[in-house]
Image: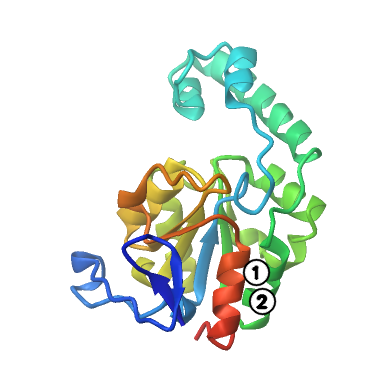
Amino acid sequence: MFIVQSTGRLQPDETYHRNHGNAVGDQPMKNTIADRRHWVFDLDGTLTIAVHNFAAIRRELRIPDGSDILGHLESLPRTESLMLHRRLQEIELELSRLTGAALGATALVEQLHASGAFLGVLTRNTRENALRTLDLIGLGGYFDAEYVLGRDEALPKPDPDGIHRLAELWEAEPAEMVMVGDYLYDLQAGRSAGALTVHIDSAGLFRWPELADIMIESLEEITTGLAADGGKTT
């Protein structure tokens, strides 16, 4: 088994105990990530190699530096908002053709799928682009379209709405789930929902340790940990 110690890194042969309080009626979380059967992944920069230049996207869409892209578009008059949303989707589609599977993504998803785990994607992209990206990186066959939620199927992260929607579809409690992502919004959504949060940062900077239960530099670390635990996800 593997857990997070005070360093925030995966460690073997330990037991991780944590309580999410009211998230599940004051019941403690299951002991390890290996017990989790409900996995939610961010897409860009988590399952894929990061290729988005958000500063360039803001310039293209005439969005102020540092502003939340989706939030800004929603604040605009409807006609302008729809036009820029269409352009954003075009940009995201163009970028999807430039990316590939992140290190360890294929092996982890294959292992979880083979073990019978529920797999979902929660992205601020559109479902259409997300499904196309999953196909392009060779992971499309592992995710049911119903469980791939984009910005039109759920309120965008950091709102936890998408996690709650997947929990309902899976007839699970959010505290039984894992949220894996590379950005602040992923961790905020997971923590707000009461899920176990995994922060992936290939640079090893881990800027939001207070929001991450587990911190990894690649998905390979999870695959290795699950293998050491006998591939258990039940």
Q: Secondary structure at mark 2?
A: helix
Q: Are marks 2 and 1 in contact (CB under 8 Å)?
A: yes
Quarter of the image where one finds residue 217: bottom right
Which amino acid, mark 2? Gln
Residue 144 percent coordinates (x, y)? 66, 65
The image position of residue 128, as x and y in percent, is 70, 45
Q: Position of residue 211 (x, y in %)?
A: 34, 51
- Compared with 21, 97 (above or below) is above
Relative to the observer, which residue lies in front, 147 or 220? 220
Relative to residue 231, is residue 174 depicted above or below? above
Residue 209 horizontal/vertical position (percent):
35, 50
> Does any portion of residue 160 appear in the rendered image?
no
Task: Label 1, secondary structure: give it.
Answer: helix
Kindly identify the residue that appears in the image at 65 percent across and 14 percent down: 60
The numbered disc on residue 108 is 1
Gap between marks 2 and 1 measured at Cα: 5 Å
Q: Which residue is painted at 57% across and 66% down in the image? A: 221
Amino acid under disc 1? Leu
Residue 150 lies left or right of residue 170; in this view the side is right
- Label 2 crowd (10 A; few <14 / some 14-19 / many >=20): some
Q: Locate residue 116 relative to residue 213 in the image: left or right.
A: right
Task: Please give the label number shown on residue 111.
Answer: 2
Q: Taking the image as drawn, is residue 164 in sight? A: yes
Identify whether 158 is placed above or below 134.
above
Above or below, 149 relative to 232: above
**Residue, x 30% and y 50% (percent of image)?**
210
Asked whether 131 or 35 is in front, the reply is 35
Which is more toward the observer, 154 or 229?
Answer: 229
Q: Residues within 10 Å of mark 1 (few under 14, many from 20)?
A: many
